[in-house]
Image (spheres, coloured by chain):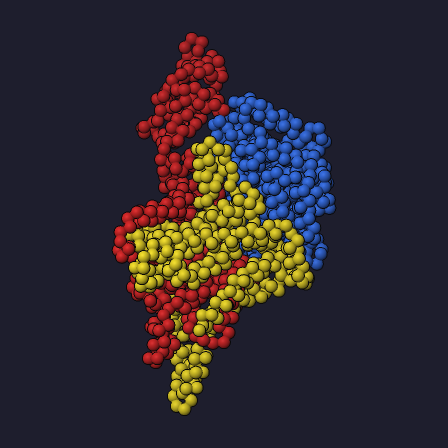
Chain colours: A red, B blue, C yellow
């Protein structure tokens, strides 16, 4: 189209820019979560995710554990704040220490005095903390068992860690949960498509009484809230003998996914060119042959689209999995493990939650990106009209 | 325990649990100051080899491991296999399981209200004769625990269905001793002193309280604990009992006054971090973090005993008893909660389990690890790992009045629904009397 | 038997079974029951063709009937009883609902959602589909916009908490406000407008869905119609609105319908972000507060939801009738 219309470069630019804007808008929220999944809990609460690569000014409390000596009536403690036990974790020995920006003697004003200047401490003496961390603490009274407190404000280097992912992935049973999810989603995607394809064809291209009503019924069933069906169906499964099992959940997902499948597939099939079908009929093909040789190949894009949606839906589903699968740990799917086990015990840790969210996105995304190519191929391969 | 309700998004059914209790005993038999005699006596009296006991409850993660560590002793003593499975949405799961006839042998209920509902529908089996007498004799304030576990069955007759195991103390205020130390504040011994301290902190330029009600679908529940504590400190316990059973209406002026007492802390912009507007949207797990920052965002946080799990690592925290008014003559009321065990699918193993949790050893095993309190007066309190745990348990054992969390006792629709949303409305500006009237209306509609 | 093996067997049996069923049923019909031979050939063929649709439809009808219709009917009957299910109260539950302010709020909010979300999602989907149509990096752009659909609702709620959070160090909106010198506020507590903030989340997710389907539809437009218009001197906007859109109007409506119906079902977003507080309740999350406690009322709400979709159903029947010659 562009080549026929001539090069309208300004329009192309406008299109490109607007798409970029849209994509960025769409991505920003997710990027925020992605970045947070690599940070640790303290850093997340101290600075925002877009400031993650920047050093964070954080306040630290430590005890003056330096060398104590006496000079006349004065007790002097000398040392370096970075040697204190509280600091070693964040600033490992041997690594480059950031400069101390300020210090203080009380938690309420941890950065009351700039580094290098002298401040009065509460024990009647003075305290000086220098930018390199060395400090001198003087007091008239003998320091007791507990060394005095010092507060220090320093720029903490940004810390990115895969710790969160380790916790989520390495957690008990995550591997099993992954396999379980796969076991649930694949049959639950394949079977509904098959059944729906046949039904959609019938509703699209076969004429029979009651067709309109059936179509309307399908649309109506689209809106049935899942929650309604759960308990009666579970009881039914128990009576029939399949109880809570994988077979049960496959059937359940098939039932729940059929309305959308039939609806989408039917709408696509209705748009297929009538001539091809009619000429095939004239040539003596049976409905079944028309279906398998003409309709199915032509409907491939729609089938692929629906397959993606159904896969995503069953992968991310929490509700149906909890009701129709056995509740023992070994049958949990990933969503259940994350929601029940992880969220339940680590609910306050944003980093872990973020990592969990991404772990559960990974496979659907891979599926989508790979199916994308099939979609495109399907679309370009046959010019439908 | 409300802290298990905060995801609350999905409905589910749970039945059997995962095999554990493979003989992994945390404390070797015979070692330590545990009550091994009770263990031996129990083991000698029960042999359930080859049987399986299924149990579900609200404990997940670490708590699930801890209950399994207790179950290991039961398994070792009787030869049975114990399968425990925990879920964050236990309250909904158990209803589905019971309705679908796939309930476990033992269910651990965080709310007596739900257990009472299920007893009335015939899903629970009454506990063995004599259990009630045992509880009366062996639990501190035993009669309260019997009352809390007694419900009307499907035929209308009362029976003891629930046995309390693992309780929570709620009337606690958490603070950072270092922050208090530096600022020179003293622990308040009375409500009047607490209010003075609050004003003092404001005068010194700080913010006294961290309050957060956010909890996803369960948003609002921490406020219900506040209101219950305030009610116990302003009215006699009989008023509390009448309120919980709806003998006096929710919008009775005494209840409204208690709500407004809570509001005097939470709706005052100077008293709360972020101002009154932030209270309803701050997540309850994030809000205590303010105690430990430098400078401290706040100095006090009123919350139940489970909250240290959500404090930042290595934070120094301590608690003091949420004081009562010296001016009133109501003693030292303590608000608490607990989980109760009930038989949802009777079997010899289930009956044996109930007997097992009557032994001191069943309590001591968990006690000695972490996060467990009990009113059982036969346990050795020296086994608590920390002094603060012991102190908490002492509060429990010494309470002059002990009352169970009210919202857990009310019918689910109120105690885990209308009360929560009513509190959210109140903290965001609605009138206390109107909110209470609305809750009462809802209660009327479910009678 | 490990579930994995079970799964593999199920796929084989399921797929093979389906194909087998259709194939053999068809064969049975054509060769045995209504053979196209002999004197009755013509009549038999007709008969076969009359029965065949039902053959194709049978598995679907069975599954739908069992998994959706049966619970629906059961639920409607349940909604006529009281909360414990033992006392018949006719439309009492429905009367209570209408009288309850919470219900009216939820209903009104739902109305807003149904109005705004499908329209915006379809519009944006169409926009993106068109813009990325001939772009060299179009597929990448489309994939990125589709990505939110791959995220579970729990994940999406988490992501948007990072946008809406009160704390300027966590929430983007408040960070922008802070940088402009304004005070933080909680977008989810602003009366009336908080609904729209929640809607943004669903639009963010669903636009990808609309985009994929509309993109396929755009690709299906015959090139000749577009070329002809360009030769006649139409500018791109005219081509879009006067040539392309009318030709894919059918698909646009399908997408709109599907998203509308989804809006009526999704409760997770409201439920996990605000729990229905601050006046953000919509019918599905409102229903959750009754689920398993007062099943009479819960099923009544579910029925109201289904009634709301009735116009859409009727419209679809009309369309279907129009289509078939």
Rendered view: B323 above or below B143? above
Residue lying furthest bottom: C39
Front residue (pair B373, B13): B13
Rendered view: B6 above or below B231? below
Q: Position of residue B7 (x, y in %)?
A: 52, 47
Residue lying furthest top: A72
Taking the spot 53% from the left edge, 51% from the top edge, the residue there is C112
The quarter of the picture where the N terminus of chain B appears is top right
Front residue (pair C323, A375): C323
Q: Position of residue A7 (x, y in %)?
A: 26, 51
Q: Position of residue A199 (x, y in %)?
A: 44, 70
Residue lying furthest front: C232
Whether residue A198 appears in this view of the structure is no
Taking the spot 62% from the left edge, 62% from the top edge, the residue there is C78
Whether residue B249 appears in this view of the structure is yes
Taking the spot 56% from the left edge, 22% from the top edge, the residue there is B204
Count of marks, rendered view: 0
Rendered view: C294 above or below B428? below
Q: Position of residue C83 (x, y in %)?
A: 65, 57
Taking the spot 41% from the left edge, 86% from the top edge, the residue there is C42
Rendered view: A138 above or below A4? above
């Amino acid at each position: 189209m562009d080549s026929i219309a001539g090069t309208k470069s300004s329009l192309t630019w406008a299109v490109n820019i607007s798409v970029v804007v849209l994509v960025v808008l769409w991505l920003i929220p997710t990027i925020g979560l992605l970045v947070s999944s690599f940070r640790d809990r303290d850093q997340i609460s101290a600075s925002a995710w877009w400031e993650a690569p920047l050093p964070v000014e954080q306040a630290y409390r430590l005890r003056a554990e330096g060398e104590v000596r006496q000079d006349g009536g004065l007790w002097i403690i000398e040392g370096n704040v970075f040697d204190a036990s509280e600091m070693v974790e964040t600033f490992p020995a041997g690594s480059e220490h950031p400069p101390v920006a300020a210090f203080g003697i009380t938690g309420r004003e941890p950065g009351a005095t700039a580094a290098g200047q002298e401040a009065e401490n509460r024990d009647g003496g003075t305290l000086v903390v220098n930018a390199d961390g060395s400090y001198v603490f003087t007091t008239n009274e003998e320091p007791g068992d507990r060394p005095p407190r010092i507060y220090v404000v320093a720029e903490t280097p940004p810390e990115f860690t895969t710790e969160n992912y380790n916790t989520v992935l390495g957690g008990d049973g995550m591997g099993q949960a992954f396999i379980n999810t796969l076991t649930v989603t694949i049959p639950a995607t394949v079977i509904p498509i098959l059944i729906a394809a046949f039904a959609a064809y019938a509703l699209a291209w076969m004429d029979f009484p009651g067709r309109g009503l059936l179509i309307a019924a399908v649309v109506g069933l689209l809106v049935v809230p899942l929650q309604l069906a759960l308990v009666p169906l579970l009881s039914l499964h128990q009576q029939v003998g399949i109880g809570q099992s994988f077979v049960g959940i496959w059937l359940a997902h098939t039932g729940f996914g059929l309305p959308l499948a039939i609806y989408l597939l039917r709408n696509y099939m209705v748009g297929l060119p009538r001539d091809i079908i009619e000429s095939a009929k004239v040539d003596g093909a049976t409905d079944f042959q028309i279906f398998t040789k003409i309709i199915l190949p032509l409907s491939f894009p729609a089938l692929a689209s629906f397959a993606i949606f159904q896969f995503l839906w069953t992968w991310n589903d929490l509700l149906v999995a909890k009701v129709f699968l056995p509740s023992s740990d070994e049958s949990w799917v990933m969503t259940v493990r994350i929601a029940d086990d992880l969220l339940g015990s680590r609910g306050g840790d944003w980093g872990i939650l973020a990592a969990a969210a991404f772990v559960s996105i990974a496979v659907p995304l891979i599926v989508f990106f790979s199916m994308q190519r099939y979609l495109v191929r399907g679309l370009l391969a046959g010019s439908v009209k | 325990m409300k802290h298990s309700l905060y995801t609350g998004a999905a409905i589910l059914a749970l039945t059997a649990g995962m095999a554990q209790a493979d003989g992994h005993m945390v404390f070797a038999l015979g070692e330590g100051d545990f009550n091994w005699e009770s263990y031996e006596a129990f083991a000698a009296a029960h042999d359930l080899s080859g049987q399986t006991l299924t149990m579900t409850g609200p404990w997940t993660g670490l708590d699930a491991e801890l209950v399994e560590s207790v179950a290991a002793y039961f398994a070792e003593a009787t030869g049975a296999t114990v399968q425990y499975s925990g879920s964050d949405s236990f309250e909904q799961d158990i209803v589905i399981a019971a309705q679908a006839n796939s309930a476990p042998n033992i269910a651990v209920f965080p709310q007596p209200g739900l257990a009472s509902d299920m007893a009335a529908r015939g899903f629970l089996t009454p506990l063995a004769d004599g259990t009630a007498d045992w509880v009366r004799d062996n639990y501190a304030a035993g009669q309260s625990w019997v009352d809390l576990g007694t419900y009307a069955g499907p035929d209308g007759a009362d029976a003891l269905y629930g046995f309390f195991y693992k309780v929570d103390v709620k009337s606690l205020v958490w603070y950072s001793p270092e922050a208090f130390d530096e600022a020179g504040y003293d622990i308040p011994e009375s409500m009047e002193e607490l209010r003075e301290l609050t004003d003092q902190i404001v005068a010194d330029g700080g913010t006294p309280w961290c309050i957060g009600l956010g909890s996803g679908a369960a948003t609002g529940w921490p406020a219900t604990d506040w209101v219950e504590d305030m009610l116990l400190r302003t009215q006699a316990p009989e008023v509390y009992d009448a309120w919980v059973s709806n003998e006096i209406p929710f919008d009775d002026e005494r209840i409204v006054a208690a709500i407004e007492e809570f509001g005097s802390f939470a709706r005052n912009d100077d008293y709360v971090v972020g101002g009154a507007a932030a209270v309803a949207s701050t997540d309850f797990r994030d809000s205590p973090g303010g105690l430990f920052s430098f400078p401290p965002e706040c100095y006090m946080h009123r919350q139940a005993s489970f909250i240290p799990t959500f404090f930042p690592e290595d934070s120094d925290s301590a608690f003091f008893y949420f004081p009562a008014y010296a001016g009133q003559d109501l003693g030292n009321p303590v608000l608490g909660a607990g989980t109760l065990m009930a038989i949802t699918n009777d079997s010899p193993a289930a009956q044996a389990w109930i007997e097992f949790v009557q032994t001191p050893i069943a309590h001591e095993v968990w006690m000695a690890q972490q996060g467990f309190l009990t009113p059982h007066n036969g346990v050795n309190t020296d086994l608590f790992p920390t002094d603060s745990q012991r102190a908490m348990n002492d509060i429990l054992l010494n309470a002059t009045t002990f009352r169970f969390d009210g919202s857990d006792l009310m019918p689910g629709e109120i105690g885990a629904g209308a009360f929560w949303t009513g509190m959210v409305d109140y903290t965001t500006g609605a009138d206390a009397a109107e909110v209470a009237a609305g809750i009462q209306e809802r209660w009327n509609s479910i009678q | 038997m490990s579930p994995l093996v079970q799964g593999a067997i199920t796929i084989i049996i399921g797929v093979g079974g389906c194909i087998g069923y259709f194939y053999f049923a068809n064969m049975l019909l054509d060769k045995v029951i209504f053979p196209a031979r002999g004197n009755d050939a013509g009549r038999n063929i007709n008969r076969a063709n009359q029965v065949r649709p039902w053959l194709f439809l049978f598995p679907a009808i069975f599954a739908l009937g069992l998994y959706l219709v049966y619970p629906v009917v059961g639920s409607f009957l349940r909604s006529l009883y009281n909360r414990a299910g033992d006392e018949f109260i006719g439309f009492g539950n429905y009367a209570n609902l209408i009288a309850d302010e919470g219900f009216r709020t939820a209903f009104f909010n739902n109305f807003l959602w149904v109005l705004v979300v499908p329209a915006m999602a379809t519009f944006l989907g169409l926009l993106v589909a068109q813009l990325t149509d001939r772009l060299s990096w179009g597929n990448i752009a489309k994939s990125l916009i589709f990505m939110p659909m791959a995220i579970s609702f729990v994940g999406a709620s988490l992501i948007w908490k990072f946008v809406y959070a009160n704390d300027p160090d966590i929430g983007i909106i408040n960070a922008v406000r802070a940088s402009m010198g304004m005070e933080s506020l909680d977008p989810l507590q602003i009366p009336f407008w908080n609904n729209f903030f929640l809607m943004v989340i669903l639009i963010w997710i669903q636009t990808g869905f609309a985009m994929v389907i509309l993109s396929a539809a755009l690709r299906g437009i015959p090139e000749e119609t577009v070329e002809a218009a360009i030769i006649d001197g139409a500018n791109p906007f005219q081509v879009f609105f006067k040539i392309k859109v009318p030709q894919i109007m059918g698909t646009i409506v399908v997408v709109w319908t599907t998203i509308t119906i989804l809006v009526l079902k999704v409760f997770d977003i409201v439920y996990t972000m605000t729990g229905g507080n601050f006046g953000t309740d919509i019918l599905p999350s409102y229903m959750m507060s009754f689920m398993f406690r007062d099943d009479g009322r819960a099923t009544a709400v579910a029925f109201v939801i289904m009634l709301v979709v009735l116009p859409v159903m009727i419209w679809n029947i009309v369309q279907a009738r129009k289509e078939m010659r």
